[in-house]
C-alpha cells in the first residue's frame, strides 16, 4: 500500500507540488493525469525517493518512506522512467538482469526470471540483441521487463510477503504501438490482481480508463480531483484540466466511459 500525505515539493525556490494527498490501496491502479508541467513526474520522483518531499510524507507499506533503507525498498519497489539512457552495449538480457541486482536469489533463479520477464513483454527475440541498437519501443519493452524482473515474486505470486510490491510507471506506453499498449494494460491488470500497487503517469485518458481503479487529475502542482474513472471522466473536468472540449460516451463493448474529442 502507498499513502501520499500532504506532500509538497519545492526545488530552487520553485514550487512543483502543493499539498498532494492520495491513498493507493494494495493492488490498486492509480493513473496520474494532467497537462505537461502538472507535476505528475515530480510526484512519482517523490514516491520513488529521487526527490525528498519539502513537506508532508510518503507512507509505504505502513512505514514512512524515510525509514526504509534503499536496499530494502529496491526489493519490492521498481520504477520505469520516461526514458532510460544506456550507452554501454549490453544485450537486452543483461539489461533485464539489472533488475535482479537487489536480490540474492542465485544465477539459476535469476536466469529463469529474466527469460520469463522478456517473454511477458513480447521481447524474447531481443534477448541477445544489443540494447543500443533497438528501436524506441523495443527499448521501452526491455526496460519494462527489467522493472518486472525486479519485483517478480510480487508480480507472479499471491504470497504472504511482509511487503507489498509497488510499481511506478512514467508514461510507459508513449513509445508503444497499439498492440503493445494493450499488452501493457493487460500486464498492469494481471499484477495488480496479485496485490501489486501500480501508480502510472498517463496522457491517454481512454487507455488509462481501461485499467485504472482511480484517476488523479493534476494541474500546476495541485491535485485538481481524485476519483474513479466514472467520476472524473466528465466533459466539465476534462475542460477544466486540459482546456479541451470533449464528449464522454459509453464504450460499446466494455461499458466504461470513453472520451471523444
Image (cartoon, rainbow, N blue to C red):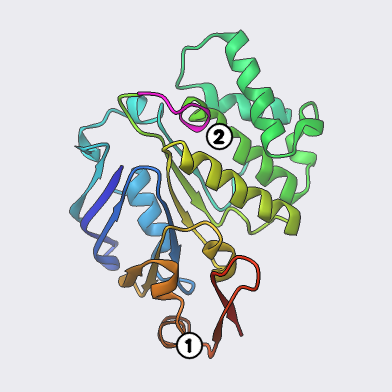
Residue 16: image tag: none
Compared to residue 126, the image places residue 186 above or below, namely below
Gap in angstroms between the C-alphas marked 1 and 2: 35 Å
Residue of label 1? 243
Q: Quadrant of residue 197?
A: top left
Residue of label 2? 148
Q: Helix, strand, or loop for circle 1?
A: loop
The image position of residue 183, as x and y in percent, is 67, 48
Viewer-proximal residue, 189 or 71? 189
Q: Which residue is drawn at 41% across and 24% down?
A: 159
The image position of residue 42, as x and y in percent, is 38, 58
Q: Of callouts 1 and 2, which one flags the residue occurring earlier in the amino acid sequence?
A: 2
Viewer-proximal residue, 172 or 131? 172
The image position of residue 227, as x and y in percent, is 35, 67
Position of the C terminus by quadrant:
bottom right
Residue 155 counted in the magenta span = yes
Compared to residue 23, the image places residue 129 above or below, namely above
- Highlighted magenta segment, given as a residue range: 154-160
Residue 246 counted in the magenta span = no
Amino acid at each position: 500500500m502507498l499513502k501520499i500525505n500532504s506532500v509538497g515539493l519545492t526545488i530552487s525556490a520553485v514550487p512543483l507540488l502543493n499539498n498532494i494527498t492520495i491513498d493507493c490501496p494494495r493492488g490498486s491502479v492509480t493513473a496520474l493525469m494532467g497537462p505537461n508541467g502538472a507535476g505528475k513526474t515530480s510526484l512519482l520522483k517523490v514516491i520513488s525517493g529521487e526527490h525528498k518531499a519539502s513537506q508532508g510524507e510518503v507512507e509505504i507499506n505502513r512505514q514512512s518512506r524515510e525509514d526504509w533503507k534503499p536496499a530494502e525498498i529496491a526489493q519490492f519497489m521498481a520504477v520505469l522512467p520516461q526514458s532510460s539512457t544506456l550507452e554501454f552495449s549490453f544485450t537486452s538480457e543483461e539489461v533485464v538482469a539489472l533488475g535482479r541486482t537487489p536480490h540474492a536469489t542465485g544465477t539459476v533463479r535469476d536466469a529463469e526470471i529474466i527469460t520469463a520477464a522478456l517473454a511477458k513483454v513480447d521481447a524474447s527475440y531481443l534477448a541477445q540483441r544489443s540494447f543500443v541498437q533497438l528501436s524506441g519501443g523495443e527499448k521501452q519493452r526491455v526496460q519494462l521487463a527489467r522493472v518486472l524482473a525486479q519485483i517478480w515474486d510480487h508480480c507472479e505470486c499471491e504470497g504472504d510477503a511482509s511487503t507489498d510490491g509497488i510499481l511506478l510507471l512514467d508514461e510507459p506506453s508513449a513509445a508503444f504501438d497499439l498492440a503493445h499498449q494493450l499488452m501493457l494494460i493487460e500486464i498492469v491488470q494481471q499484477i495488480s490482481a496479485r496485490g501489486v500497487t501500480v501508480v502510472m503517469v498517463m496522457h491517454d485518458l481512454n487507455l488509462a480508463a481501461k485499467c485504472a481503479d482511480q484517476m488523479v487529475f493534476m494541474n500546476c502542482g495541485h491535485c485538481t480531483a481524485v476519483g474513479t474513472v466514472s467520476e472524473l471522466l466528465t466533459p466539465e473536468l476534462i475542460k477544466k484540466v486540459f482546456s479541451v472540449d470533449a464528449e464522454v460516451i459509453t464504450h460499446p463493448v466494455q461499458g466504461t466511459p470513453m472520451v471523444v474529442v
